[in-house]
Image: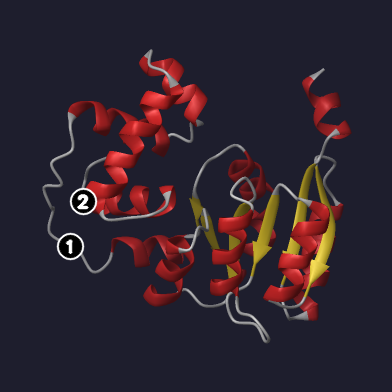
Amino acid sequence: MTQKKAEETPIRVVLIDDHLQMHKIVQATLGATTDIKLVGQGANGEEGITLCEQLQPDIVLMDVVMPVLDGIEATKVLHERFPDIKILVLSSFHDHESVYAMLRNGAVGYLTKDSLAQDLAETIRATFQGRMVFSSEVGAQLVSPPQPTVNFHLTDRELEVLVLLAEGLTNQQSAQKLSISQSTLKYHMTNIFQKLGVQTRSEALVLAAKNNLI
């Protein structure tokens, strides 16, 4: 029953990349799946925003360096306008600045194009389920250079919330597991963001991991 439902309502994906070869690879990879459908393709950030307005996909695969409007600015706009759309970065660039700029603007995962063929479908499924996924090269950027652990003065409850977020639970699932209301959970998340000095869930989890909070 679950498999049938997945086939009837596939994960809807939009690809934004200015390289034709990348479009061919993604088309071939996703074309072999039954639960993921590539519903739109664009070559720059402006086209990506337009496609998202028209198609309301579940996930956007976003390049970083593109003409007209780059992935960093496009991600920021999409995250503000359509917070329910999950943005997964696909890029050849995995330097510290690019990774953090995309996460800061709302991306929830970051894959390098080198790992694309073998990881893409599973990564899309994991992202759709609320998990954060990073390729190994990006993971190295997130933990290096090592930073000293900082005391952010989080309460025990706030630390519990962080751990559940890191496990990929939704707000509703986290609230149920902690036996609190969703409004109380959002209150804790607001406090966490303020104490960590971040604006998105992705930033919070990355910073928490770097400082051994989760």
User: Residue 163's x, y, as percent?
Assistant: 33, 33
Question: Based on the displayed image, in which of its 4 quarters is residue 46 positioned?
Answer: bottom right
- The secondary element bearing badge 2 is classed as loop
Residue at the image position 38 percent from the left and 28 percent from the top: 185
Q: Give the residue number, with chain letter if any, for mark 2.
A: 211
Quote the CA–CA distance across marks 2 and 1: 7 Å
Say above or below: 208 vs 161.
Answer: below
What residue sits right under mark 1 in the picture?
147
Q: Which residue does the image show at 49% across and 47% down from the upper left?
A: 132
Q: Earlier in the sequence, mark 2 or mark 1?
A: 1
Residue that extends furthest to the top in the rendered view of this protein: 179
Q: Is residue 112 visible?
A: no
Label 1 neighbour load within 10 Å: few <14, some 14-19, many 20+: few
176, 182: nearer the viewer: 182
Q: Give 83 or 208, whichever is nearer the viewer.
A: 83
| Protein image colouring | secondary structure
Residue type for callout 1:
Gln
Circle 1 — which element? loop
| Residue 148 locus on image (x, y percent) | 12, 59
Q: Residue at image x 60%, y 42%?
A: 126
Residue drawn at 57 percent across, 77 percent down:
92
Label 2 Cα crowd, 10 Å radius (few <14 / some 14-19 / many 20+): some
Verify CB contact (< 8 Å) between mark 2 and mark 1.
Answer: yes
36, above or below 94, in the image: above
**How many numbered circles are shown?**
2
Q: Amino acid at mark 2?
A: Asn
Measured from the top left, where is residue 78 in percent x and y? 62, 60
Q: Is residue 120 left or right of residue 203?
A: right
Left or right of 103? Residue 87 is right
